């Protein structure tokens, strides 16, 4: 009976706590970089973007990707239409309305604009000094994302 209870207890913990992708806020990243320097991968998306949602349900649920992101990078899951003010890198960024219940966050524009436009989803990779080292605006399947992470780790 004790073994059964222990099994259920540990299975319950592993099913809910382990194997989940850790996502940080920009404010947390500022503090974490003081403790341990890592590259930051920012996934910039919207709720209405089909390719963004597909990456969430495929790429970011892949066990190998979750393990690599959690151990080697700081990951930020960032909705480009976030309405709250965000302080990052000693700067305050705000939501910019552009119409009736439509707009984009200044930080999404700063990190996700490529060739004067933002197209979702966007992966923005920052180095340990919060400088942009890579921007990619397209769907990445799990295999391609693993290759990208391995290149970033080198």
Image (tube, helix red, strand yellow):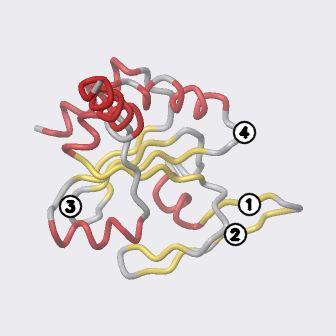
Q: Are marks 3 and 2 in contact (CB under 8 Å)?
A: no
Spot occupied by residue 73 in the image (x, y as percentages of width and height): 25, 48
Relative vertical location of residue 1 with respect to residue 152 in this rendering, above or below: above
Mark nearer the N terminus (4 vs 3): 4
- Mark 1 crowd level (few <14, some 14–19, many ≥20, 10 Å Cα): some
Residue at disc 2, secondary structure: strand
Residue at disc 1, secondary structure: strand
Residue at which label 1 appears: 103
Report the Cα–Cα distance between label 1 and label 3: 29 Å
Q: Where is the N terminus found, in terms of image quarters?
A: top left
Where residue 6 sits, quadrant-wise, is top left
What residue is at 28 percent from the left and 40 percent from the top? 69
Of tags 1 and 4, which is closer to the observer?
4
Residue at which label 4 appears: 48
Residue at which label 3 appears: 128
Q: Are marks 1 and 2 in contact (CB under 8 Å)?
A: yes
- Mark 2 crowd level (few <14, some 14–19, many ≥20, 10 Å Cα): some
Spot occupied by residue 44 in the image (x, y as percentages of width and height): 52, 48
Report the Cα–Cα distance between label 3 and label 2: 28 Å
Relative vertical location of residue 54 with respect to residue 117 in this rendering, above or below: above
Please tell me which residue lies in front, 58 or 18: 18
Of tags 4 and 2, which is closer to the observer?
4
């Amino acid at each position: 009976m004790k073994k059964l209870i222990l099994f259920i207890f540990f299975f319950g913990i592993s099913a809910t706590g382990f194997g989940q992708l850790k996502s940080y806020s920009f404010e947390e990243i500022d503090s974490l970089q003081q403790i341990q320097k890592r590259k930051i991968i920012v996934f910039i998306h919207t709720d209405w973007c089909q390719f963004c949602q597909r990456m969430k349900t495929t790429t970011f649920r892949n066990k190998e990707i979750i393990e690599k992101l959690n151990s080697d990078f700081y990951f930020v899951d960032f909705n480009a239409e976030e309405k709250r003010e965000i302080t990052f890198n000693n700067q305050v960024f705000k939501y910019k309305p552009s119409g009736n219940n439509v707009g984009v966050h200044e930080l999404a524009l700063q990190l996700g604009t490529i060739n004067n436009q933002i197209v979702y989803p966007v992966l923005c990779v920052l180095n340990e000094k919060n400088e942009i080292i890579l921007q990619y605006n397209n769907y990445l399947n799990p295999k391609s994302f693993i290759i990208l992470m391995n290149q970033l780790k080198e």
